[in-house]
Structures are given as structure tokens and as C-alpha cells.
Amino acid sequence: MGEKLNWLLTQAMPGSLVLQPWLKAHGISYSLAQKYVQSGWLKKLSAGVYYRRGASEAVKPSWVDAVQAAQTQLSLPVYVAGLSSLRYQGLSHYLALEKEQIWLGVGNKQVLPKWFREFAQQEWHFCSHQKLDSLTEKDVKTITIEGESLKVSGPELAAYEVLHSMGQAISFEHAAELFQGLVHLSPKKVQSLLERSRAVQTNRVFLFLSHYYQHPWAKYLDESSIFLGSGKRQVVEQGRYNERYQITIPLAFHAKD
């Protein structure tokens, strides 16, 4: 067995995605990769995209492999976000569907490769950060998902991403139920995050729910440093008006508030 092939087999487990730029960076040319395909070591998915074949044809790459390849082989600013991040950190108790939607955070103006966007017809939900000035290393963390180390949004950023996606990928009620369980958020991280956010509605709903559920970390927040804009915001239709944050909320939440 050649040295380069031996290296490949030690670096990529059966089912793992293998990308040509990564192979080239480690001395494996395109022509050599094609020889590995012909010999049955690699399976070609599309131009420059392969996966390590296993003993069974059933061993194929999952969305976890796609995200890990994007993170480690291409060094792209993509990570598991929002609802998916909360779920894999044990902070969401909703059962996954047969083919779950995976939430991802992507750096502003970052264009993802076509193979990734169309990977295995996976349904992705991309969280927008256009109104978030910047992300810091404290906003993300690394956890193990299906045996692989992946970068994910920390609970504070994940909560923000969930609320920012209300009305698009999640309902107010679902988002609020998730928020109810977030009793151990870091007030310093929440403060830093909301101070960097220019998303008026998201900031207001975040603060509203933090007080609605009487989370202990909420009392340490300095709202005077958080951008809340001006004017009313209609978060839900046919809701009741919350005077403090100037947002409409579902009737059930108005009663307790």
C-alpha cells in the first residue's frame, strides 16, 4: 500500500467526505484521486467531491460529514446553528423528523459550494447574521455530533438565531417553548450578543421572553446598551400589544405578562 493511500485511509473513516482541495494540499493529485476511485477506495459524488468507501454500500456520508468537511477541509465559516445547535446540546426536547431540517450559520457574504448546498438533497435552513455586527470565538463552541467534532453556536447565539428565524422557519410558540428551558445562559454573553445586534424585533423579543419566563440571568442585562429602535413591531398577527417592548405577542403570553 502506498504511503499516500495509507495516509488517506488513516485520515478518512469509511463514509467520510473527501474533497479535492484537501487531497491536493496533502500531495494527492486529481489523477491519483481518480486511481483511488477506480481501485474502489473512493467513491465520486461530483467534481472534486468523494467519500471513503466502506465494507458496505450502506456506509455513506451524512450531513455531519458535509459540515465537518466544510469546516476542516475548506476552513469555511459554517457551523451548526439555532434549533439544531440547541437540539444537539440537549436543550431541545422536540423529536427529530425522519428527514430533519438542519440549521446552519454562515459568515456574512460567504458563498457555499454547490455540492454542499445540494448535498444528499438535505434540507438546510441558513440563519442570517446580516444585522449582527460580528461573531466572536465565545459565540461558538465545539461538541461531538454522531461521533464527529463540529463547531456549533453556543446556547446564547442559538437562542438569538431561533428568535431571528421566527415567522420563517419556526413559530413564536415553538421558539418560546425552547426559550423557556434556557435558564442557564450567560448574562455576559447575552449582553455582548445583543449589543452587537441591530435586529430590533429580535432584540425586543429576546428581552421580552427573558422576563416573561423570569430567567435569573435576565436581571443582569443592561437594556440601555441594547439597540431597541423606535416604533411598534408586529411579531404575530392578531396578537396583543406589549407596551414595554412595543411588540405584538400571542394572546396566551399577554395574559401572564
Image: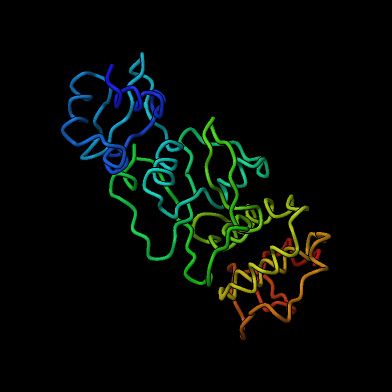
Q: Is residue 241 left or right of residue 66?
A: right
Q: Residue furthest left?
A: 31
Question: Between residues 172 and 255, which one lies in front from this camera angle?
Answer: 172
Residue 90 vertical placement versus 204 (above, below): above
Q: Is residue 44 left or right of residue 132?
A: left
Q: Position of residue 31 (x, y in %)?
A: 15, 33
Q: Residue furthest front?
A: 3
- Which residue is located at x 23 percent, y 39 percent? 48
For the rendered model, the colour scheme is: rainbow
Q: Position of residue 162 (x, y in %)?
A: 58, 57
Question: Between residues 235 and 49, which one lies in front from this camera angle?
Answer: 49
- Quadrant of res 197: bottom right
- Which residue is located at x 48 percent, y 55 percent? 105
Residue 234 vertical placement versus 46 (above, below): below
- Which residue is located at x 24 percent, y 30 percent? 44
- Which residue is located at x 26 percent, y 26 percent? 43
Residue 76 vertical placement versus 242 (above, below): above
Q: Position of residue 146 (x, y in %)?
A: 53, 31
Residue 157 vertical placement versus 69 (above, below): below
Q: Is residue 236 left or right of residue 60?
A: right
Q: Position of residue 39 (x, y in %)?
A: 21, 18
Location of the N terminus (image quadrant) = top left
